[in-house]
Amino acid sequence: MYTKILFALLVFFTAGHAAMAEEAAPPCVATDTLCLSDMLVQQIATVKEDQWRDNTYREAAKVLTHEKRTEAALALIDKIKNPDTKAMTIRGIGMAAAEEKMTAQEYDDLFAKLSDAAAKIEHPPSHAIALTYISMAQAFAGDNEGAMNTAARMENTALRNKAYGEAGEIQATRGEIEAVKISVAGIEDSGYRDKELRIISKAFTDGKYYDHALSTAQDIKDPYQKAQAILNILVKQVTPEEVSVE
């Protein structure tokens, strides 16, 4: 009698424990990143605080892009409320894509969709910033023509100049002197152009493209900025590595 009761209790508790363990089991294997990213997106939707939810969607979009799930990443933009965070998410997707191996057509399609997403941002400054980020990401991806086209569409002169300048900086790290000349030519403000030329000359110098660095420095009109660019070329070649010019 007692044996039967003990056996029944043992079966009951064992079955109950197994059911609880099964219920508590995670829906994904930790190394299954595709499943895990889907679980993350579902979890983010339950976050009540707008800022925290928006920021986490932004980071999740980068992960999805690295997983080559760009459509899923793009879908997160509309879930974000804050316009600045939307712009940063567009940047995150673009920069993550630039780090991946994608075809020219895939980049064209993605950046066109990012431009469409930017167009939906009703806050003008955030919209302009989003376009700046797209241009920058295109330059990183090696799409120089696309970067120039995106920058040219920007109505804000200061941000348009910034987009051209940043594209030039990125191109300089790859030693692309002809692309740099095209980018710099788009900068309308002479003072800002000189500043960018000095930065670009330094980028060439850091990459040991010394001829390109000097050619760029020669285009600087401001005497001080030009002197700084030339000084930097000298410093890089004749002084110890730990010494540098600001």
Image: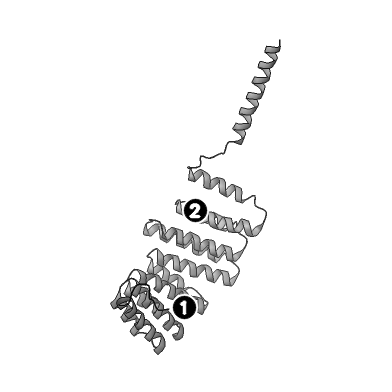
Q: Nearer the viewer, residue 131 or 208?
A: 208
- Classify 10 Å Cα crowding around label 2: few (below 14), some (14-19), many (20 and above): many
- Asked if residue 47 is positioned above or below residue 174 in the image, the reply reads above
Pinpoint residue 238: horizontal percent, then vertical percent: 30, 78
Pinpoint residue 121: horizontal percent, then vertical percent: 58, 66
Please report the residue visible at 50 percent of the width from the left and 76 percent of the height from the top. 159
Q: Amino acid under label 2?
A: Val
Inspect this view and state whether residue 182 appears: no
Q: Amino acid under label 1?
A: Asn
Please report the residue visible at 52 percent of the width from the left and 48 percent of the height from the top. 37
Q: Is residue 164 left or right of residue 81?
A: left
Disc 1 on helix, strand or loop?
A: helix
Looking at the image, is mark 1 or mark 2 nearer the viewer? Answer: 2
Q: Nearer the viewer, residue 110 or 227?
A: 227
- Asked if residue 81 is positioned above or below residue 246 in the image, the reply reads above
Q: CA distance from mark 1 to mark 2?
A: 30 Å
Pinpoint residue 58: horizontal percent, then vertical percent: 55, 58
Choose top left, top right, bottom left or bottom right for residue 177.
bottom left
Choose top left, top right, bottom left or bottom right for residue 179.
bottom left
- Classify 10 Å Cα crowding around label 1: few (below 14), some (14-19), many (20 and above): many
Q: Which mark is residue 63?
A: 2
Residue behind mark 1: 161
Disc 2 on helix, strand or loop?
A: helix
Pinpoint residue 68: horizontal percent, then vertical percent: 44, 52
Inspect this view and state whether residue 127 appears: yes
Please report the residue visible at 40 percent of the width from the left and 70 percent of the height from the top. 170
